[in-house]
């Protein structure tokens, strides 16, 4: 009886913390998102620019490309900007994961079935 109860508790506890694709953990800031636009830094809205000590300086952002991604936060949708390189070739409408808890935001492509 104890073994069955222990297994049941372990399964219930781990069910809420399963990372997306086994590596993008919700509790570490990863969210499912969609690429809405690809823009140069100087076209970003002020609320989309990361605000923190390590935020990029205007000089460091000249000529950089950013993906504007939309993710769900409770009942609301939010948009954030994430720096990308041209070689990454993100496209509008592409499904991605975005880490919204880090100042140096990251974006990763989702596997086809997620």
Image (spheres, helix red, strand yellow):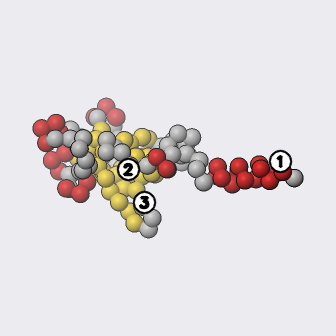
Residue 89 percent across, percent down from the top left: 33, 37
Report x, y in % for residue 43.
17, 50
Question: Badge 1 is on which residue?
Answer: 3
* Crowdedness near tag 3: few (<14), some (14–19) or many (≥20) residues, C-alpha within 10 Å: few
Q: Is residue 58 left or right of residue 9?
A: left
Of labels 2 and 1, the one closer to you? 1
Q: Are marks 2 and 1 in contact (CB under 8 Å)?
A: no
Q: Which image quarter: residue 66?
A: top left
Query: Mark 3 = which residue?
Result: 72
The image position of residue 73, as x and y in percent, is 42, 61
| Residue drawn at the location 87% of the way across and 52% of the way down | 1
Q: Is residue 86 above or below residue 41?
A: above
Q: Residue furthest front?
A: 2
Q: Residue at x 23, y 57 (%)?
A: 47
Q: Residue furthest top?
A: 87
First in sequence, mark 1 or 3: give its number. 1
Badge 2 is on which residue?
Answer: 100
Question: Badges 3 and 2: C-beta atoms under 8 Å apart?
Answer: no
- Which residue is nearer to you in this view: 13 or 109? 13
Q: Earlier in the sequence, mark 2 or mark 1?
A: 1
Q: Position of residue 12 (x, y in %)?
A: 69, 54
18 with respect to 90 (left or right) = right
84 sits to left or right of 46: right
- Marked residue nearer the N-terminal end (3 or 2): 3
**Residue at left offset 42%, top offset 60%:** 72
Q: CA distance from mark 1 to mark 3?
A: 38 Å
The residue furthest right is 1
């Amino acid at each position: 009886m104890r073994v069955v109860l222990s297994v049941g508790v372990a399964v219930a506890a781990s069910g809420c913390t399963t990372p997306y694709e086994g590596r993008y953990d919700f509790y570490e800031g990863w969210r499912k998102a969609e690429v809405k636009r690809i823009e140069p830094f100087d076209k970003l809205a002020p609320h989309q620019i990361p605000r923190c000590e390590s935020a990029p300086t205007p000089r460091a952002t000249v000529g950089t490309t950013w993906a504007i991604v939309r993710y769900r936060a409770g009942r609301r949708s939010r948009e954030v900007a994430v720096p990308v390189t041209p070689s990454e070739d993100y496209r509008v409408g592409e499904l991605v994961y975005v880490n919204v808890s880090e100042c140096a935001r990251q974006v990763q492509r989702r596997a086809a079935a997620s």
